Amino acid sequence: KYGYVPDDVAALTWDAIGLLSQALRNTKGLSGNLDKDRDAVKDQLTQIKDYEGITGKMTFTPGGNPTKCAVIVKISDKGDFEFYKSVCP
């Protein structure tokens, strides 16, 4: 549609917006108090399990760190990036 294939940054941004959107929906409404709402969104992010993003499945630890599989690519003889394998935690 736009004349090029979206890069990894576009894919990660899409997933980040999707995660934020889900966390906001899970708060069941914001209070208008910035500090309280930040904590509510952060708390909801840590509750997300097995989020199906376009870059793969993500889960958050209780500390708020995301865990997901990493994709390893290799460079072909022609100089192109090729999928090699996924490594999951």
Image (spheres, grey):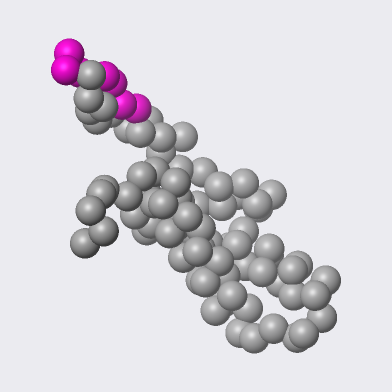
* Residue 10 horizontal side relative to residue 40, left or right: left
Q: Quadrant of residue 71?
A: top left
In this view, which residue lies farthest toward the left? 78
Task: Decide: is 22 above or below 51.
Answer: below
Q: Is residue 88 visible?
A: no
Inspect this view and state whether residue 66 appears: yes
Q: Give the answer, above or below, for where 25 lies relative to 2.
A: below
The picture places residue 4, in percent across and down from the top left corner, at 25, 49
Q: Identify which residue, 43 or 19, lies in the foreground.
A: 19
- Residue 74 pos. (x, y %): 28, 21
Residue at the image position 39 percent from the left and 43 percent from the top: 8
Which stretch appears magenta?
72-78
Quadrant that contains the N terminus? bottom left
Pick out the residue farthest to the front: 3
Q: State the image coordinates of residue 40 (x, y, percent, origin top left).
A: 71, 72
Left or right: 14 in relation to 26: left
Find residue 7 and report its image quarter.
top left
Which residue is found at the position 65% from the left and 52% from the top?
64
Check residue 7 for magenta coloring: no
Q: How many marks?
A: 0
The image shows residue 46, relative to residue 70, as above or below, that is below
In the image, residue 64 sits, relative to residue 87, either above or below, namely below
Judged from this view, the residue extending furthest toward the top is: 77
Estimate the x, y position of residue 17 in percent, counting from the top left.
50, 64
Residue 43 falls in image quadrant: bottom right
Nearest the eye: 11 or 65: 11
Q: Is residue 30 left or right of residue 7?
A: right
Tell me what residue is drawn at x 41 percent, y 52 percent. Answer: 10
Tell me the residue at 75%/67% (across/down): 39
